[in-house]
Amino acid sequence: MATVENISIDSSANSVVLKEITIQDAELVSYLSDFDKSEQEEAIKRALRIGASAMELVGTSKEAEVVENRFSEMEREFEDELDELRDELDDRFSEEDGEVPRILDQHFGDDGHLKEHLNDIFGSDGQFAERLQDELGEDGEKIQEALDPDREGTPTYRLQKRIVEEIEEMKQRFDEQEGKEEGKDEIRQKTTLKGYEFEEQVKEMLSELVHQTPNQFEDTSEQTGELGTSKKGDFVISLNDTDQRIVVEAKNGSFKETVDAEMTEAIENRDADYGILVASSIEYLPRTQVGWFSEIDQDYLVVALRDQDEEEIESRFFKFAFHWARTRTMLSAVDVGDDIDPEVVKGELDGIEDAIDNFSKVRSNCTTLEGTVDDIRNTLNEIEADVTSRIGRLEQEIGNSS
């Protein structure tokens, strides 16, 4: 316990004791005068908590800087992989010196092995012409024997054998090339996932989001909850400034139940005020009902982190979901009255949802290489700044109403 004059702070018990503190502030006096004496102590506690929450927002710029640095690093990695892919495609398919055109030309070109073999057998001076001249005669039986592809030693037998050998050789070459590509894909995938399962990736993202904030989270994936036998609800975020809880359910596959059934159970099992269902891929979600980013009945949020054809997840989608859930949860703890404008809140939430929808569309253009990299990067940054700004205004609106 640390004590400074008339203020005592107990970190282990999360308590602050004020002794004989005098605050001369007209606004504070006016605010507390509206409460009965029996309610004034709780009103003071609430004012201190809300004030601390507002001061916490000052640290948002540091968090944004850390995330921005991470985005820049991801962009550089993405550009490096694109350069590597272009080089590999050039090596394999370049008309001048690519591997595939060279192999095809080697076997089927004007000077290819196949044409050479055909000329050796069927050319004017080929083996077949020589054999016909020496052995055909008038006996049809000899002709039939000479042309029998199943008889060892005949020209057609040798032709068939050589063609099969050439095809097998080409097949082996392509298999070797394919094996190299699959090996590179496997290494690339391991590098992207860093050896973690999807739940570990969600855990890592949560660690970054609550870093240097009063908020905390707990991995509850192996713990039973309020329902007794259920382990539904992989993570629980504790918002210490409002004493509220957000449950996070991570999905890396198809659903055994409906989305609503999953989240209803998760929220109840973890005694949470709000929920986030985060899917590793859009392919696991019913797009006609939810899609990339959807809030259901102001009870929980559904978000996907990548398209079904992508390998890397988009952590910014989870960042948006976290701040949306935190804002929605804090908003539910505020007494909505004359001090808070519902139109402002609705407008900001609608704007955030539209911006995130635009974000997913622009990002899809990025994955299909539509548009320039610079234009896409700038647009994504503008959208991210818009979402962050709107979240800040919402939290300020909530703070001002208290």
Image (cartoon, helix red, strand yellow):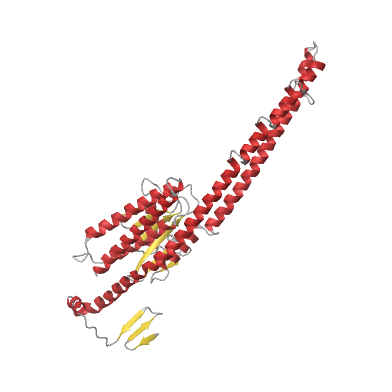
Question: Measured along the vertical axis of the image, is residue 110 above or below residue 340?
Answer: above
Q: Residue furthest right?
A: 134
Which corner quadrant holds the C terminus? bottom left
Which corner quadrant holds the N terminus? bottom left
Could you say which quadrant of the image residue 170 lies in? top right
Could you say which quadrant of the image residue 150 lies in? top right
Looking at the picture, how far across and down is residue 29, in whole percent? 19, 79
Please state if 280 lies on the left or on the right of 170 as rendered. left
Looking at the picture, how far across and down is residue 13, in whole percent? 38, 79
Question: Measured along the vertical axis of the image, is residue 27 above or below residue 294?
Answer: below
The residue sitting at 39% across, 49% down in the picture is 362
276 vs 221, nearest the viewer: 276
Q: Residue furthest front?
A: 96
Question: Measured along the vertical axis of the image, is residue 138 above or below residue 389?
Answer: above
Q: Is residue 156 visible?
A: no
Q: Is residue 183 visible?
A: yes
The mark total stands at 0
Looking at the picture, how far across and down is residue 305, in whole percent? 43, 54
The residue sitting at 32% across, 71% down in the picture is 53
Q: Residue furthest bottom?
A: 5
54 vs 237, nearest the viewer: 54
Question: Measured along the vertical axis of the image, is residue 257 above or below residue 246?
Answer: above
Looking at the picture, how far across and down is residue 17, in whole percent? 32, 83
139 vs 225, nearest the viewer: 139
